[in-house]
Each structure stands twice: as C-alpha cells, then as structure tokens.
Image (tube, coloured by chain):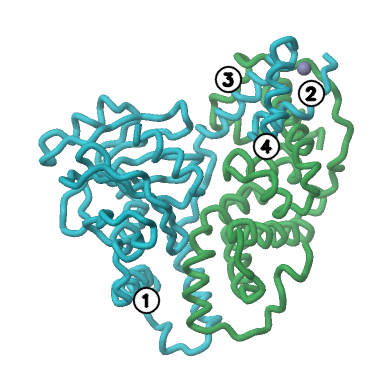
Chain colours: A cyan, B green
C-alpha cells in the first residue's frame, strides 16, 4: 500500500514519457512489486476505457461555418474573401495545382528517383478531407479485417492487403472505395486516439521503395511507399511519428 | 498564460493571414471543441466559447510564430474557458488542485474494466472531477498530448504534469468505483 511509484513513475511509464533508462529501471521494479503491477493493470484498463468510450466530441458542422464567417468578417480586403467558406479547400487545392507542385516535385530532393506517384498531394488531401465529412468515412464499417477484406473483392480489380493493428494502437475502422488521380483506389481507415488515418492503396508495376520522408500541407501529413506491387499513401492529422509507425506496420 | 505568446491583437489581418490560419489552426477545431466541451460540461455553452476562442486566436494570430499550433490554440481555448467559468460558475474553480493525495488500495483492473465499460458512467465520473483534474485527463487520454504540450496548454510546470495526471487518474478511479454520483459531487 505504500510504493511511491504508483503515484509517480508509473504514470510516466504508462504515458511513454520516461527515458530508456528510466523505463528499464521501472520494468525491473515491476518484476518484484505486486502493487505496481496491479496499479499498472488498472491504469491501462482505465485508459483503454477512456479511449474506446467515444467521449471525444467533434465540432458540429454548423459551428465550423459560423467560425469561418467570423474569420471572414475579421479579415481585411474583402474581395478575396467573399468566397463561400465551403470552397476554401477547393481553392487551396487549386492554388497547389496552379503552383504545379506535383507529387513528383516534392519528393525529388528526397533521393528516390523512381518515386513518381500517380496522384498529386492536393488530390490526397482532398480525398482525406472529403472522407471526414459526415457519412463519408467508410462504405464498410468493421474492425474485423476478415470482414473488410472480402468486401473489396469484386469491387476493385485488385484486393488490398487489410490488417488490423489494434494491439499497436491503430484500430481498423473500415474501408471504402475512393478515386485518386482518376483511378479507383481502396481506402483503409484506421483510428489513432480518435484521429482518423486514411491509407490509400492501389496496384502498381513499379518496384518497391522505402517509406518516403513525410509530406506536410494544410495541417495534414502523409507518407508514401511502394511494396509488393501496391502503392500506399497514408495521410492524417496525427503526428508524423504515429503515421510512420503505422507505415512501418503496413510495410512488414 | 504569458501575454507574449499571444502578442498584440490589434493588427489588421489580411487574406494571407486568413489562408495561413485556415491551414495551420482551423484543422484543430475539433480539439478546441472537445476541450471546451469537457471543461464547461455543456454543449450549448461550449459552442459559444469555442467560437469565441477561435476568433480570439485569429486576432492574436500574428503572435503565433510557428511551432505546435494545436498547443497554441488549446492554450487560448483553455483560458477562454476559465474566464467563462470564473464569470458564470466560480464555485467550480475553488477546489484546491494540490490537495493531499491519499494512498489508497489499488482498484482491481477487472472492477475498473466493468465500471469503465459504461460510457454514461465514465462520462459522469469525468464530469465530477474538478476542472484542473479533468483537463489533464482530457488532454492526455482523449487528445493524446505529450507532457510538454500539457504543460504548455495548462501552464503547469512540466515537472508536475506526471503527478497531476496521477492525482487525476486516482480521482477518476474513485469516482468510477467507490462513490455514487451524488457522493462525488458533494465532495467538490
Ligand atoms: Zn512498486
């Protein structure tokens, strides 16, 4: 009843905030301290309840609209801003395209000469944002890869690999059909601490690549790679380290 | 909050600011809304406060010099919420944050799993916690913030984030397993 660690270090350990030495030290303490072992189990259970509970509340669409109107009102040079709020993303995408910043151009400096992806960053961001509109996220909603995978069968000319990584903190939410660069693609949807990650998958004849360095625009990050005849692009507003972790899991 | 982070709000913002704000800050509206919802415990009030905070963030936007836009925004949201609470529900802010943390028998993981399985019960338990406990839990468990981000948002020293979370988790466990909602609210 008196191990001080239950009120201190245990939480740093649970939250992944200890350095390697601190974590190793606590792990060896765990082997001999029943109190900490029990307390850690309780905290993990509480955490998973909180994260699975659906307690996270997203902003209502109406609020988003009101805020955009408020922002417009607080901005000078009205001519540029009389664009209806809902068109902003389209405008932003158009600006990116006009700048002719292609997927290829972005990756050029990153050493891989064969990394021409068949779609642009603007298209990826657009598809991701579109999926976040109410009712658009999944065509098949299931956390079971044995349900999601067969669903794609017959709807596409290929069957994407579908895996759940719930144990690693990436819960499969479902899948849907999407269109990228004029091609039909599979979109696998994962959630990470209530944030949505879209993984777009389509077949390719190009050779494998490593996971490319991250791209970042408009508050979204993405990672792209090719593996065993499939082209992958994962995009989300989670941190790049989270995204990279999922990319590595998928890459295996 | 240090005033310097938010800078002066008097500049006139132009289309370029508007586009940058759209790109950097607006994607975190859900985070802003969720934090306000849990701090104020009322959907109706939190819509107003989230909107106010967002427009305030916009006015202060020239004071944002890059870095963690989510933490920057949430800091403003939190301050707006506390200002609102001070005005409308001052009693809620009177709980001492540094109250003694009593050693108590650990709850068994099984008992917690059962209690935590009920969304309503979990939500009520979270709402019975004083705001300063509630916010660290919401930031850590729902929003996935690091200790560094939590320290920046809540203005508590980074060295005390861990113990703040320890206290908050203990309070939540207690609210979930040891007391009925009435008892928990009397405790406040
Ligand atoms: Zn111990």
Mark 4 to mark 3 CA distance (whole Å): 24 Å
Q: Which residue is mark 4?
A: A17
Q: Is residue B181 visible?
A: no
Give the quadrant of ligand 1: top right
Crowding at mark 4 (Cα within 10 Å: few <14, some 14-19, many 20+): some
Q: Are marks 1 and 3 in contact (CB under 8 Å)?
A: no
Is the residue marked 2 within 8 Å of ligand 1, measured from its CB? yes
Q: Dot 1 corresponds to which residue?
A: A84
Say left or right for A77 vs A95: right
Q: What residue did someone put label 3 on?
A: B113
Q: Chain of mark 4?
A: A
The chain identifier of the residue carrying mark 3 reads B
Q: Marks 1/3: CA distance?
A: 47 Å
Please, is residue A139 above or below residue B116 in the view?
Answer: below
Q: Chain of mark 2?
A: A
Q: State yes or no: Cβ of the residue under disc 4 lies below 8 Å from any atom of ligand 1.
A: no
Count neighbours of disc 3 (C-alpha within 10 A) and say few if under 14, some if 14 to 19, many if 20 or more: some
The mark closer to the camera, 1 or 2, is 2
Q: Answer above or below: position of A107 versus B100.
A: below
Q: Which residue is painted at 30% across and 40% down in the image?
A: A188
Query: Where in the figure is residue A80, as x and y percent of width and height?
Result: 41, 86
Q: Identify which residue is drawn at 63% across, 16% down.
A: B109
Marks 4/3 same chain: no
Q: Which mark is residue A5?
A: 2
């Amino acid at each position: 009843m008196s191990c001080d660690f239950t009120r201190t270090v245990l939480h740093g350990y649970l939250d992944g905030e200890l350095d390697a030495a601190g974590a190793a030290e606590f792990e060896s303490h765990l082997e001999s301290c029943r109190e900490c072992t029990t307390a850690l189990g309780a905290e993990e259970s509480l955490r998973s309840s909180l994260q699975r509970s659906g307690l996270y509340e997203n902003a209502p669409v109406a609020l988003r609209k009101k805020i955009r109107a408020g922002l417009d009102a607080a901005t000078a040079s009205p001519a540029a801003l009389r664009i209806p709020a809902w068109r902003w993303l389209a405008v932003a995408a158009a600006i990116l395209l006009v700048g002719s910043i292609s997927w290829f151009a972005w990756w050029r400096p990153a050493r891989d000469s064969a990394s021409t992806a068949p779609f642009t960053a603007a298209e990826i961001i657009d598809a991701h944002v579109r999926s976040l509109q109410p009712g658009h996220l999944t065509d098949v909603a299931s956390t079971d890869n044995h349900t999601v995978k067969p669903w794609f069968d017959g709807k596409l000319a290929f069957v994407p690999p579908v895996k759940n990584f719930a144990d690693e903190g990436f819960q499969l939410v479902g899948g849907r059909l999407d269109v990228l660069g004029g091609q039909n693609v599979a979109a696998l949807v994962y959630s990470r601490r209530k944030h949505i990650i879209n993984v777009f998958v389509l077949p390719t004849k190009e050779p494998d690549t490593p996971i490319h360095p991250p791209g970042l625009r408009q508050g979204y990050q993405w990672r792209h790679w090719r593996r065993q005849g499939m082209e992958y692009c994962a995009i989300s507003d989670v941190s790049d380290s989270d995204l990279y972790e999922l990319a590595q899991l998928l890459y295996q | 909050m240090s005033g310097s982070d938010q800078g002066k709000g008097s500049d006139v913002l132009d289309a370029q600011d508007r586009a940058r704000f759209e790109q950097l800050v607006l994607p975190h509206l859900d985070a802003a809304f969720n934090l306000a919802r849990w701090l104020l415990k009322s959907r109706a009030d939190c819509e107003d406060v989230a909107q106010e905070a967002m427009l305030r963030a916009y006015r202060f936007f020239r004071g944002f010099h890059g870095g963690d836009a989510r933490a920057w925004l949430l800091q403003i949201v939190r301050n707006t919420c506390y200002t609102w609470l001070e005005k409308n529900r001052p009693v809620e802010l009177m709980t001492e944050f540094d109250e003694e943390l009593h050693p108590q028998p650990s709850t068994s993981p099984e008992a917690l799993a059962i209690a935590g399985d009920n969304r309503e019960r979990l939500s009520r338990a979270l709402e019975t916690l004083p705001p300063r406990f509630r916010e660290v839990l919401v930031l850590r468990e729902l929003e996935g913030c690091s200790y560094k981000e939590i320290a920046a948002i809540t203005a508590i020293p980074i060295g005390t984030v861990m113990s703040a979370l320890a206290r908050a988790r203990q309070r939540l466990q207690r609210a979930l397993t040891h007391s009925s909602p009435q008892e928990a609210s009397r405790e406040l």
